[in-house]
Image (cartoon, grey):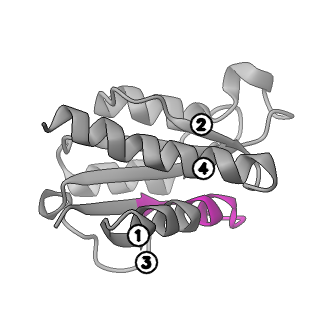
Amino acid sequence: MVSFLIVYASWSGNTQEVAEMIEETLVSENIDVVTYRIGGGTIPNPRHFDVMLFGSFTWEQGATPDEVKDFVADVGYKPDNVYVFGTGDTQFGGDTLFCHAAVKLARFYGSTYEPLKIEQSPRGVQEEKVIEWSKGVIRHWKNLNE
């Protein structure tokens, strides 16, 4: 069975909500999922999963949170098949810095799939955006592995 690891950092709960929606979507598509909140105990080994989905909020003026940087350092290598999602707020830095942590993480991991960017909390139209992105990740991964 295909297995995905969802890793995320969340302070306000927005990124956690996105992670939970992604998990629900993946499970409904018969994907085995393990979800890990950064700082929540023993770090799962990404080598044991087919895909890692990495979520982060954007801090201050487009910065990646320290706990996310620490997680990357603790893992110690760059897993293959990383997809990135993030939450942010355009009122802090406008479109240029919106979800900039997700953009930087996608670049760092060499992700070939556009990162998901959610304004604050995934409500309304953004719920569908999360679901479609999640299904797109599955299709993208399957296409790469056919």
Give the Cα separation between the discs numbered 1 and 2. 31 Å
Q: Secondary structure at mark 4?
A: helix
- In contact (CB < 8 Å): disc 3 and disc 1: no
Mark 2, residue position: 63
Which is nearer the N-term, disc 1 or disc 2?
1
Which is nearer the N-term, disc 3 or disc 1?
1
**Residue 130 — which label?**
4
- 101 relative position to 54: left or right: right
- 73 relative position to 12: left or right: left
Q: Position of residue 121 (x, y in %)?
A: 76, 56
Pair 4/2: label in front = 4
Q: Position of residue 9 (x, y in %)?
A: 52, 60
Q: Secondary structure at mark 2?
A: loop
Q: Which residues are magenta?
A: 7-18
Name which residue lies at 70% across and 32% down.
Answer: 61
Neighbour tally class for label 4: few under 14, some 14-19, many 20 plus, Cα within 10 Å: many
